[in-house]
Image: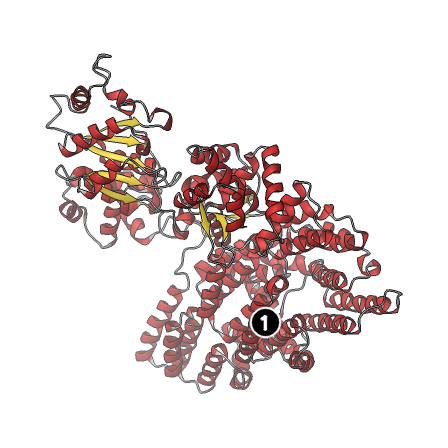
Amino acid sequence: MTEVLASETLVGRSGILAAVADCLLDRNGPGILLLGDAGLGKTALVNAVIQELGQRVRPFRVFAGATLAGVPFAALAPLITSLTPGQINEPLSVMKAVTAALNPARERESVPAVLVVEDAQHLDEGSVAVLAQLTAAEVAKVIFICRPHPAPPGEIFSMWSEGLLDRFDLQPLNGQDVDQLCAQVLGAPVVPSAGAVLRRASGGNPMFLLELIGNARSAGQLVNRNGAWMLTSELRGNSLRLLDLVRNQIVHLDHLQREALDTVALAEPLPLDVLRQASDHYAVDELQEMRLITIDSDAEQHVRLVQPLVGEVLRQIVPAARSLRIRQRILQLLENRPQTMDGLLRYVSWGLEAGARIPDTEILEAAQLANRLFIPSYVERVAGAIKDPALKLAARVEVARAKWYRGDIRGTAWEISGIVERTNHPATLRQVSMLAAQLARRQGAGPNAVKQAAYEWEAALARIAESARGIDAQELELGRLGSRLLVLEGMQAEGRHVETERELRHIWQQGGDGETRLLAGTLLAESMAVTGKPLSALQVLADVKDILDAAGYWGLQHTGFFMRRYILALLHAGEFAVLEEYLRNHVSQAPNSLIYDGGALHFSAGSVDLRRGNLGAALPCLRQAVSMLRVSDLQSDLPDAVAAAAYAASLLKFRDVASSYTLEHESLARDGMESSLLGRAHAAMAKVQQVGLRPTLSRLMSLADTAAANGAVGPEIDILVLVLRAGDLSVVRRLKSLAETSEGRTAEFAFSYSQALDAKDAAGLIALSEAAAREGLELAAADYAGHALRILESRGDKSRQLEAQRLLKRRTAALGKAPVATGQGMPDLSKLTRREQEIVALVQTGSSNRDIALSLGLSLRTVEGHLYRMFAKLGISDREKLISGDHGGDHTA
């Protein structure tokens, strides 16, 4: 009997696992055909089923193989050792020997035999015939484990169509399953952005995913920060184990198929007609049938590999001479350079590797595109190939941006130094000036440094205009508009949104080139959102989005710039559901930007949870954002994220965590990285226990006055709400007047809130609390309930006080409804077997041990044994903690 090794709980396979187990336990039921590509976990699934069934089945295992496919009955060799050499090729003798091996006389009527056939697609005809007879005669339950390509013998599919086999097709893991498997392997969750990138890279294939995790972790690309794993750079599929896995997946391909596959890997995406000229027609069709390649529906029918990771590995293992030959052949067949973005990148990189003459302008274009797609490693690889002195400065700007993505501040500064003074190209001047402004803010130089970058840009334009080379009048005007927009952006960084709005609207409405309108419209929307018109800002941004969608390559550079202002407008408008959906959709697309700019998205998601009052989710999300922003902070969000994390921790009474973040916030401010007005207000609220209520209120009022002086209506409303939360009602009428003329749900709630407080309308506050709770605004709902209770207490209204007390208790309890990253939360049920998970479900409905035993047909002692083992796995001591999800964490870290 083959020994079955214990396996970890399978992720995403509970349904199919239960179905396979039921098939094996049904003595009169069919056998099993389990189909799935390499790496999807077919064998692991069967192992898990057999392990769970334990003594209820007798497992046996045989292995087919491509090298033995032509040898009669080779796969059944372990079961026919009793045969003499003369009997080995006799089907009847083989049938009798296999039957005897599977069912000795003393065991035939006791425990059923299960025969697992690995790699059944390679079975010889004789073995298939014997196994079909075994299945039909119910001698044993046969499990055929097959890859769909090469196709299994037709007899196996005939058995399925005749009802002798139940068929199960194993699919790749979905996003939730990938996250769960990552957490199971790493012992802690991955941040959503990292999970999305890992899912895209692995294609949901568990085998590839596990290798990617292991390789990224050992290479330092996957690191644990604040109890969650994050990516610090692009993934690389270059582990020896991964190389072996891919080799095993393609070992069955013949020479022509492998030639076509290597061609696609080296040149993807490749027009179909070019691939057919470079490779065998039939081989291309066969690769598509095997689902190794896919053909796009565009005009040129571009061909790509289905699994990107396979392509990355193939490009490493194709011999250099053969790689060169294939690439040179493709270069000869391509009439024009590729028109797709990834096609251009591949064309330039393998053209350089093949020794082709790629124009410097195309190398620079590819480097610029790679930066816009957040692939800094590509930029660093190709930029050095540019020889034209006139383009070298532009190449240095791209290298600087690549370093910027990686968080290399010093390297960025070194690369761009002196370029403004030396370049004679307006496009290079634009790029370096905009990067210099970003760098200045990240270095803590402040808004004046942003404006200084703009002034230096304008001075350089004047220098170029006066030079012998000169500059086109239209190009000069566009450059001046660009430098002026950078000045206006610096003014916005100073809080001067009211001053900038009129000029930005003029530039936006005047027309001009697409890039100028895109930047002007986006900055205009920011001013409108901050000054109390977020819904109008969203209308402007809808028009800007049309420009961005039609922009092509150049628009990619401004995607993050646009996204930041769109998120800001949604936050000020109180459109939290729309914002959450937007963030989910962006993360699900798994762009490379998540690796380098994911901290900003996590900060946005955490900000929504904080505003809603979903504090248990907000704090871990904000802590993850802080960790990621410490590595790469493209938009200078770190101070605000630190302040928000401090405030969320203080609301949860995690004083040590709050203190740590407030100290970091102060340190950043000393370094010149000042947070926004709301960020400073959050930091002040986080320190209330340390400095006292009066100094905190004084600080908040000072910030509110600064907001009012700058016309920053949105931040002023947010700060005044914090003042009310701290218990100072002196700002009620100020808030009411401000909110009455502002747009959006946030302003609507603020107006109703202040109006009820002004009228001392307890009933109105209670109704408002219910309305806020229905919209998921639990923190606001708790505020409204608390003020209602205080009004009723001041009146001595005993009968209504009790109702308000119950309401406040419910609202306060709702604030921590999501698990926090400190040990709280539901136990990790993925550690449990299917039977144990069934028991958990019954425990959580209030069933007693006896009820569970009767429901599942088990003895009371068996149920008690299951519970004992479950408690040990989950690290809990009794069933109450299983129901409540309380692990007894210290809640201070």
> Which residue is rendered at x = 86% and y = 64% of the image?
469
Query: Which of the 4 image quarters holds residue 159?
Result: top left
| 426 is higher (above) or lower (below) than 100 | below
Number of numbered discs present? 1
> Which residue is rendered at x = 51% and y = 86% of the image?
740
Residue 686 location (% of width, % of height): 55, 63
Which residue corresponds to mark 1?
A: 547
Q: Nearer the viewer, residue 224 or 809?
A: 224
| Helix, strand or loop for disc 1 | helix
Q: How is the image coloured?
A: secondary structure
Q: Is residue 466 left or right of residue 781?
A: right
Three-letter code for the amino acid on which mark 1 is drawn: Ile
| 297 is higher (above) or lower (below) than 356 | below
Query: Around disc 1, counting alpha carbons within 10 Å, would you say few (fewer than 14), some (14 to 19), or many (20 or more)?
Result: some
Q: Nearer the viewer, residue 206 or 440?
A: 206
Residue 366 location (% of width, % of height): 65, 53
Residue 574 location (% of width, % of height): 48, 74
| 825 is higher (above) or lower (below) than 570 | above
Query: Which of the 4 image quarters holds residue 391?
Result: bottom right
Q: Is residue 612 left or right of residue 350?
A: left
| 795 is higher (above) or lower (below) than 775 | below
Q: Is residue 225 visible?
A: no
Q: Is residue 764 visible?
A: yes
Q: In which quadrant of the rendered image does the N terminus lie?
A: top left
Q: Nearer the viewer, residue 232 or 622?
A: 232
